[in-house]
Amino acid sequence: MKRRSLAVLLLLLGAGRTLAATPDDAVLGRWLAEEPDAGTTTVVELYREGDTVAGRVVRIVDRHGAALAPVCAGCSGELRGRPLTGLRFLWNLHRADGLWDGGTVMDLRDGLTQGVTANAEISVHGDTLELHAYRGLRAFGQSRTWRRAPGTAMDGTSEPARQR
């Protein structure tokens, strides 16, 4: 009887943990945005701002893992010339119909579109995230796929830092 009670308790605890990690939290945490043409990987962090989700750049590295420090030369106003690291580039995403929608994303890639904002929506499928950005008609937008960064839990929390 004790074994059966223990088994039922463990099953219930496991079910509670599964229910606690809602799909709403799956978007949170650190993600790797790779730009193969540029040979860079950007670590971005998605986090809650009240009832919405926002994102910021954590770090940018080249293909060898060396940290880069680009600035937003194409941005306007107070963002012009600011380092991309730490910059909030995604904001105001709301949960709707199984995805995060209604937000705004700023293109931080070097080139003609740097600093341009667009509508944004995000969907998460396990350890991959799809960001779709568009201006005007959704069909003419672009999608990017990010991978969850190692050491980030599904609820967006990070694993404890290792002592060296």
Image (cartoon, grey):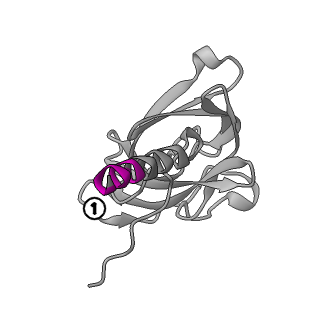
Residue 151, located in which quarter of the rendered image? bottom left
Magenta range is 2-10
- Residue 6 is a magenta residue: yes
Image side of residue 71 versus residue 48, left or right: left
| Residue 17 visible within the image | yes
Please name whichever residue, 39 or 55, is drawn nearer the observer in this view of the structure: 55
Q: Residue at x 53, y 58 (%)?
A: 57
Please name whichever residue, 45 or 19, is drawn nearer the observer in this view of the structure: 19
Q: Where's residue 76, x and y in %?
A: 72, 52
Q: Which image quarter is the C terminus in?
A: bottom left
- Residue 56 is a magenta residue: no
Q: Residue at x 62, y 62 (%)?
A: 81
* Chief secondary structure of the magenta portion: helix
Please name whichever residue, 117 or 4, is drawn nearer the observer in this view of the structure: 4
Q: Where's residue 146, x and y in %?
A: 42, 40
Q: Is residue 102 above or below residue 29?
A: above
Q: Where's residue 2, x and y in %?
A: 32, 57
| Residue 27 visible within the image | no
Image side of residue 51 versus residue 99, left or right: right
Residue that badge 1 annotates: 65
Q: Is residue 58 above or below residue 155?
A: below
Element class at badge 1: loop
Q: Where's residue 133, x and y in %?
A: 59, 31
Q: Amino acid at mark 1?
A: Gly
Q: How many marks?
A: 1
Q: Is residue 151 above or below residue 106?
A: below
